[in-house]
Amino acid sequence: VDYEQTLLVVHHRSEVDDFQLGTDRGYRIERSIGRGHFGVAFLVKDGENQRRVLKALELDRGDARREAEIMRQLRHPQIIRFRDSFEEKGFLAIVMDHAACGDLLKRVDVAKKAGHPLREEQVMQWV
């Protein structure tokens, strides 16, 4: 399976089941949540029924393995936690926690559009 085929698969909800990564590790893909030049991000459930994000990167992309290694080493309360990585079907899968409330950029955009600036106390909690 290559990246272009992956995009075709995730465009059709009924076909998501055809592109399963990590089923042997207990991951179940629920839906596609994003895509970029080098991969696709999926919302998955792990073996403990916890929601996670599985980022599938093309293995032939030179820095894919480096990205996983850097994420594995990061430990900070404000950075999404790395959970797992593995290679399968020509992809490097990186599994991380799911931020159900979205990321900081999303919160800033919502506040800006609503005309309600973020409170300094809230921003200080995030950093």
Image: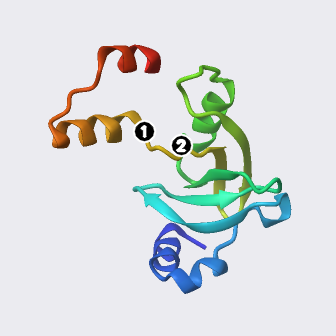
In the displayed structure image, the side of residue 55 where residue 26 appears, left or right: right
Residue under pointer 1: 103
In the image, what residue type sits under mark 2? Ala
Q: Nearer the viewer, residue 63 or 95?
A: 95
Q: Give the spatial CA distance, label 1 vs label 2.
A: 7 Å
Quadrant placement of the C terminus: top left
With 27 as the anchor, is 4 left or right in this view? Answer: left
Percent across and percent down for residue 17 are 65, 79
Disc on res. 99: 2
**Most foreground residue, 44 or 10:** 44
- Colour option used: rainbow
Give the image quarter of residue 123: top left
Give the image location of residue 119, x and y in percent: 29, 20
Q: Quadrant of the N terminus?
A: bottom right
Q: Residue 23, percent across and down? A: 79, 66
- Seen at 18% across and 42% down, the residue is 114
Marks 1 and 2 close (CB-CB < 8 Å)? yes
Query: Compared to 43, does 112 lie above or below?
Result: above
Question: In which image quadrant can residue 109 be found?
Answer: top left
The amino acid marked with disc number 1 is Asp
Q: Nearer the viewer, residue 107 or 119?
A: 119
Question: What residue is drawn where x is 54% and y is 40%?
Answer: 63
